[in-house]
Image (cartoon, grey):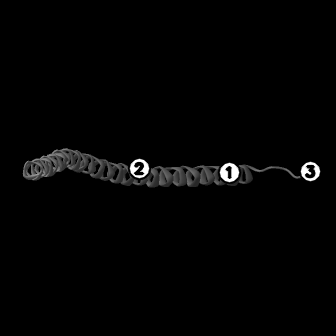
Amino acid sequence: MSTVTDSGLQQLKDLITAGQLATQKQIADLNKKMEVGFANFDTKFAHLEGKINTLSGELSIIQSNQKGQDTRFWSLVFLILTTFIRAICKLAKFY
């Protein structure tokens, strides 16, 4: 067996310390990347939420316009039917 010297132990300790520092730096870099990624995600999510709210408002407007159009359509149908019935009644008086 070989004998272990103080300088060998010190080198081993330095290697372990350097490995730990490198690992800590990698973890810190990863944390920064994750923070940036989550910040970007939050921004995009907020933007998407705004678009959804806008679409919801526009759909509400479309629904209210559709109700108005339905009312006008049925009013037109009623007007056409009553005009047709009045025309038939006038023609019936001639016979």
Which element carries disc 3, helix, strand or loop?
A: loop
Residues at circles 2 and 3 in contact by the CB criterion of under 8 Å: no
Q: Estimate the spatial distance between the alpha carbons at disc 1 and disc 3, rounded to whole Å.
A: 19 Å
The residue indicated by pointer 1 is: 10
Residue sitting nearer the eye, 32 or 92: 92
- On residue 1, the disc is 3
Q: What's the amino acid at mark 3? A: Met
Q: Estimate the spatial distance between the alpha carbons at disc 2 and disc 3, rounded to whole Å.
A: 54 Å
Q: Earlier in the sequence, mark 1 or mark 2?
A: 1
Circle 2 crowding by C-alpha within 10 Å: few under 14, some 14–19, many from 20: few
Image coords of residue 4 (percent x, y):
80, 49
Q: What's the amino acid at mark 1? A: Gln
Residue sitting nearer the eye, 8 or 31: 31
Which element carries disc 1, helix, strand or loop?
A: helix
Which residue shows up at 12% across the image and 49% down it? 92
Q: From the viewer's perspective, is 5 left or right of 75?
A: right
Q: Earlier in the sequence, mark 1 or mark 3?
A: 3
The residue indicated by pointer 2 is: 38
- On residue 58, the disc is none
